[in-house]
């Protein structure tokens, strides 16, 4: 079987690692794997790589987005070049992942997919596919996406437009382009996103929930504690994000720091240099790292992992923490609560800071060893990447065989 996946990145970031590891699973079982990705997003790969576009095209697509709110509708030429390469490969299945990111023209791509009638599996990581602009609307309670977007209240949020508001036309065009494919299956990592898809204009398609998976050999309970943590002799509260912003809850950690005494230590990973420079002196801030062994050591060293996200699908960070034996406290946001149960952490009503503090203290005042085994067992049972990527492979084989009938 030949499978071509398309994603903004490969082997970097959460979606890029998922794409890479699905490709590795295909290769391990004797299949041919191809990955097409944006020119700005590669960290090497075991698959055959196809680079989409160049830096100039990405910048021009970004400009088109900023001025005219046409994200996903730039990059026509480079997408036509991609289609030419798809024709040369003649894949049995196409796997779509994150299509937004200033690198792909969805009109050109989906018109081709409809014409080719190739089996397509589309993994959604957020809500962009069925809105006129935004990736998440939960934080403002917007429901315009159900019947048709207009006057977007998140126009200045990613993918930001500081010029026109084209959300009404974007919604109309996406609905026309993304519906009517003969053989498309949607995958979500959370039941929360699955339920939203079933309320959207994508409801005509079958939706399968395949949980995210983590490498249980890398993220485990036997990592050495980093030296700087050993020296602290404090209870460690950990936060991790690819990109820290208001949605991920950076300000919540700063507020939390003001409520804690010096027997606790907040450690944040994934910060920019500017963010690190602005932190209070008693908060440890680290840059984003591709060194997963180092990342795992911090998860294992923490007494609690806190995820105060206000808009999210199914954060992989929760799963990584559980695999390292660390309980999770999260807001009741999107699919984030689906990672934990009463034995492995706590879920708090979104935005209720006092209850968040209470949940954190409840764990820190107890004995972490009571959580370690249960956290690890939950990760092994539900979030083993080998099992979850096998689910992908089984689905690919199923849609391929169905298309041959």
Image: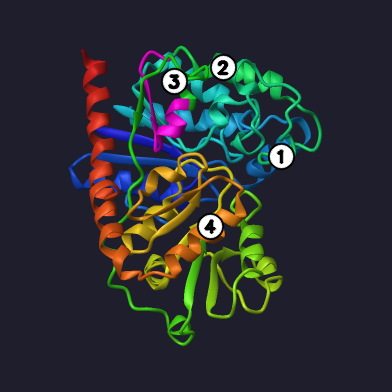
Task: Specify whether residue 194 is painted magenta.
Answer: yes
Q: Disc 3 and disc 1: Cα gap in Å?
A: 28 Å
Query: Dot 2 corresponds to which residue?
Result: 175
Distance of label 2 from label 4 (alpha carbons):
32 Å
Q: Which residues are magenta?
A: 181-195
Q: CA distance from mark 3 to mark 2?
A: 15 Å
Residue drawn at 62 percent across, 15 percent down: 147
Residue denoted by label 1: 160
Q: Residues within 10 Å of mark 2 (few under 14, many from 20)?
A: some
Residue 219 visible within the image: no
Between tags 2 and 4, which lies in front? Answer: 4
Q: Position of residue 306 (x, y in %)?
A: 50, 59
Sequence order check: which comes first, mark 1 or mark 2? 1
Q: Give the residue pinned by disc 3.
A: 113
Judged from the image, the secondary structure of the residue bearing numbered disc 2 is helix
Q: Which residue is mark 4?
A: 241
């Amino acid at each position: 079987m030949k499978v071509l996946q398309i994603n903004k990145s490969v082997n970097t970031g959460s979606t890029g690692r998922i794409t890479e590891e699905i490709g590795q699973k295909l290769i391990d079982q004797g299949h041919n794997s191809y990955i097409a990705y944006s020119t700005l997003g590669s960290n090497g790969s075991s698959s055959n790589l196809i680079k989409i576009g160049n830096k100039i095209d990405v910048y021009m697509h970004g400009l088109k987005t900023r001025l005219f709110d046409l994200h996903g509708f730039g990059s026509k030429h480079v997408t036509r070049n991609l289609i030419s390469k798809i024709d040369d490969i003649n894949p049995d299945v196409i796997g779509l992942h994150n299509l937004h990111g200033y690198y792909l023209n969805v009109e050109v791509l989906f018109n081709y997919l409809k014409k080719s009638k190739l089996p397509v599996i589309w993994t959604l990581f957020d809500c962009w596919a069925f809105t006129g602009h935004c990736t998440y609307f939960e934080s403002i309670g917007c429901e315009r996406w159900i019947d048709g977007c207009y006057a977007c209240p998140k126009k200045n949020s990613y993918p930001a437009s500081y010029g026109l508001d084209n959300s009404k036309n974007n919604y109309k065009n996406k609905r026309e382009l993304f519906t009517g494919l003969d053989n498309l299956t949607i995958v979500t990592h959370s039941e929360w996103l699955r339920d939203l898809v079933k309320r959207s204009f994508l409801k005509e398609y079958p939706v399968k929930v395949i949980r995210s998976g983590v490498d249980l050999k890398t993220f485990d309970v036997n990592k050495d504690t980093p030296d700087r943590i050993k020296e602290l002799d404090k209870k460690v509260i950990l936060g991790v994000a690819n990109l820290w912003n208001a949605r991920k809850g950076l300000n919540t950690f700063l507020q939390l720091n003001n409520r804690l005494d010096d027997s606790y230590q907040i450690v944040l990973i994934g910060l920019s240099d500017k963010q690190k420079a602005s932190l209070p002196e008693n908060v440890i801030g680290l840059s984003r790292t591709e060194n997963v062994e180092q990342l795992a050591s911090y998860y294992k060293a923490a007494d609690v992992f806190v995820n105060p996200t206000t808009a999210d699908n199914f954060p992989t960070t929760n799963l990584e923490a559980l695999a390292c034996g660390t309980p999770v406290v999260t807001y009741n946001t999107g699919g984030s609560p689906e990672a934990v149960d009463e034995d492995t952490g706590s879920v708090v009503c979104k935005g209720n800071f006092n209850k968040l503090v209470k949940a954190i203290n409840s764990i820190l005042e107890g004995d972490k060893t009571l959580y370690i085994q249960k956290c690890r067992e939950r990760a092994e049972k539900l979030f083993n990447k080998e099992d979850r990527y096998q689910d992908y492979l089984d689905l690919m084989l199923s849609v391929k065989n169905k298309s041959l009938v």
